[in-house]
Every structure is written in C-alpha cells, then in structure tokens.
C-alpha cells in the first residue's frame, strides 16, 4: 500500500526546480498600478541564486539590483519583486542546507540585502546570523527601528 505522506522537497530540490521559468510576460492591468507598463521577467530560482553567488567578499547586492540584472538579461522592463525575493530566500536556505551536508561551495546569501540595505530576517538564523556574517566581512550593521541595516551599504554594492 502506498504511503499517504508526501515527502517534502529539500531546499536544494526547490532551488533546482525551475518549472517553466524563466518567462517574460506582459504587465497586465492589475499589475500596472504597481509596476507600470511593459514586461516583467519571472526568474528561475537558479538564476537568482547564481547572481547572489557572484557577490564577492566585502561587496553587497540588494533584491532590487538582482531584479535589474534579471530585467537586463531577459530584455524585460522589470524583474518580478515577489518571485525574486522568494527565490533569494530559497537560495539562502538551500545554501545553508548544503553547508550542513558538508558542501564547501555554497552561495554567500548573507551579502544579499533587502531594499534600503536591510538585513533579511527570513534568512537562516535570522537577523543575528546574517549580522554576524556581515560584520565578519567588515560591514557595520545597526538597528534602525525594528530593522537592522548595513551602514553605507550603497558604497559596497556590486553594481
């Protein structure tokens, strides 16, 4: 008799599952209120991870910069903010999962910040873990309100 419980995909499997992505679609009327007109690229998870993986020590990137790279790459007006953020989150967890398995070459996800240089509380280990990794690379992280932000992050952006 077949088991009724469905095995969960690992973070690395989620990252590798591109479904039918990337794809570029017209920005519809509902989306245009927020994003204007033109086209939006919905990236593949691996693409987001690959961009995050190219950020060298001492440098940073934000989700918005990743979206710009994706838009340029696919000749789209914008990169989808929703899927790009979700796939960065998946990439971070996949990297941490791979590191836990003893893999040496994982992406430095902690170098990817939210808009405004904000540390991503949803990455593995939360704000404290990302703050520690960023400070280890020479960045200063301060609390502003309920968010943690990298001081002068703009000076360290790869783009």
Image (cartoon, rainbow, N blue to C red):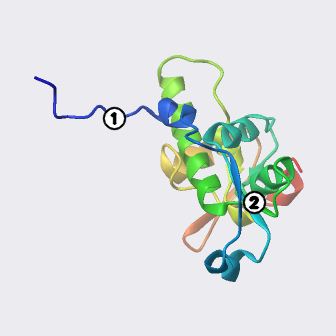
For the N terminus, the image quarter is top left
Mark 2 or 1 closer to N-term?
Answer: 1
- Residue 88, visible in the rendered structure: yes
Q: Is residue 128 left or right of residue 35?
A: left
Please give the label number shown on residue 28.
none
- Residue 90 x %, y %: 53, 43
Residue highlighted by disc 1: 8
Residue highlighted by disc 2: 64
Q: Is residue 42 left or right of residue 18?
A: right
Is the residue marked by circle 2 packed among few (<14), some (14-19), or many (20+) residues within 10 Å? many
- Residue 89 x %, y %: 55, 48
- Residue 147 x %, y %: 59, 67
Of 68 and 158, nearer the camera is: 68
The local secondary structure at tag 1 comes to: loop
- Mark 2 vs 1: CB contact within 8 A: no
The local secondary structure at tag 2 comes to: helix
Is the residue marked by circle 1 packed among few (<14), some (14-19), or many (20+) residues within 10 Å? few
Residue at 65% in and 41% down: 109
- Of all residues, the one furthest to the bottom in this rendering is 33
Is residue 66 positioned above or below 94 on the image? below
Of 97 and 2, nearer the camera is: 2
- Residue 135, visible in the rendered structure: no
Of 16 and 26, nearer the camera is: 26
Residue at 82% in and 56% down: 68
Q: Dividing the picture into quarters, in which one does residue 15 lie?
A: top right
Q: Nearer the viewer, mark 2 or mark 1?
A: 1
Residue at 53% in and 35% down: 17
Q: Is residue 22 left or right of residue 4?
A: right
Q: Between marks 2 and 1, how big is the CA–CA gap?
A: 30 Å
Residue at 60% in and 61% down: 82
């Amino acid at each position: 008799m077949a088991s009724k419980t469905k095995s969960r995909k690992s973070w690395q499997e989620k990252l590798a599952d591109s479904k039918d992505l990337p794809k570029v679609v017209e920005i519809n009327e509902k989306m245009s209120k927020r994003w204007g007109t033109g086209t939006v690229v919905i990236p593949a998870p691996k693409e987001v991870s690959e961009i995050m993986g190219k950020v060298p020590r001492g440098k940073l990137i934000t989700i918005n910069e990743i979206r710009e790279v994706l838009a340029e790459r696919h000749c789209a007006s914008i990169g989808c903010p929703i899927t790009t953020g979700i796939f960065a989150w998946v990439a971070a967890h996949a990297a941490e999962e791979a590191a836990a398995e003893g893999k040496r070459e994982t992406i430095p996800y902690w170098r990817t910040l939210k808009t405004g240089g904000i540390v991503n509380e949803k990455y593995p280990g939360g704000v404290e873990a990302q703050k520690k990794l960023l400070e280890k690379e020479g960045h200063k992280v301060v609390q502003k309100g309920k968010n943690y932000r990298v001081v002068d992050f703009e000076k360290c952006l790869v783009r």
